[in-house]
Image (spheres, helix red, strand yellow):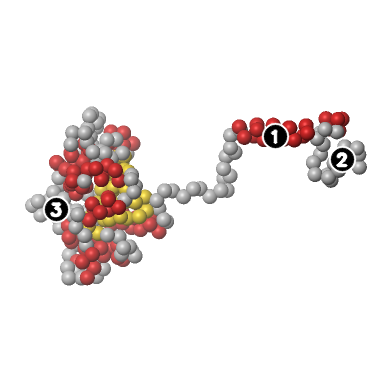
Amino acid sequence: MGACSSKQGVETLPTPAECRTGDTSTSSHKTSETESVASHLPKPPPSPLAPPAPPTKTRAIIFTDAGADLDDEMALLLAKALIDADQLTLEAVVCTLHPARRRAQLVRGTLDALGLGDVPVVVGSDGGDTDRQQTAPDPSDYAYVPADEDERCKSLESLAFLEGVLTNAAPKSLSIVILASLKDASSLLEHHERLFVDKVQDVTIMGGVKWPVEQYAVPDSAHNNSFDTKASVFFLQAVPGAARAARRCWKGRVLRGARAPRHL
Ligand SMILES: [Ca+2]
């Protein structure tokens, strides 16, 4: 062993300066200097082999007119997949548009068949179909849809149920998804403005707005806007961001940052 070897064993190699002077304090000084420099360097990028962070779980209320077009029921199938992937919780599914109760029976049957029997189903309003022109499947035609007298129909909620959902939700934690007439969502905002503003994080509407958007978004001729034009105008004016979102999306226009209009 040479003169520069450590008496404690060969744990670290001495620097040439230590060899010359025998002073090991130089080594500790340089170590602390290195640590200081390292602390100011940017963190290394994550390894491509590291699993990505899980997305934040969405807590959603869906407004649907299931029974009119297949896309509403397809949305429930997608919701089931997202729930299974631990990315979504359905706080309620609101069935709007006459005949709303039949639509609710259909959705109850669909959710039960998907193993989502704990998701509340709400019977909404006529959605603007005051002449009762719209139709929905007859429960007696489908074995999985509960009939009028079925016990499962007793679990169907009224629109008043939504106030409790908003009340119990954490601030800015809810996503509103509207796949139908805007009447019931508009009513929820109008009657529970403060709760809505406090608890809703974002709103997604299958609809559209006239372009370009000036001070407020104006509903275009999209089918869902036409059921209750007054409600559509009210709701779109209440949700800023329509202009920006409409530029990004072609059909399913996403409106973020829901808040009540100043003129309320
Ligand atoms: Ca729909």
Q: Earlier in the sequence, mark 1 or mark 3?
A: 1
At which x and y percent is residue 95? 21, 55
Mark 2 vs mark 3: give the one in front. Answer: 2
Q: Which class describes the residues within 10 Å of circle 3: few (<14), some (14-19), or many (20+)?
A: many
- Three-letter amino acid code at disc 2? Ser
The residue that mark 1 highlights is 32
Location of residue 152 by image quarter: bottom left
The residue that mark 3 highlights is 126
- Three-letter amino acid code at disc 3? Asp
For the point 86% across and 30% down, the residue is 21
Q: Is residue 44 left or right of residue 132?
A: right
The answer to whether residue 69 is seen in the rendering is no
Name above or below for residue 261 compared with residue 187: above
The residue that mark 2 highlights is 5
At which x and y percent is residue 167? 27, 51
At which x and y percent is residue 51? 53, 50
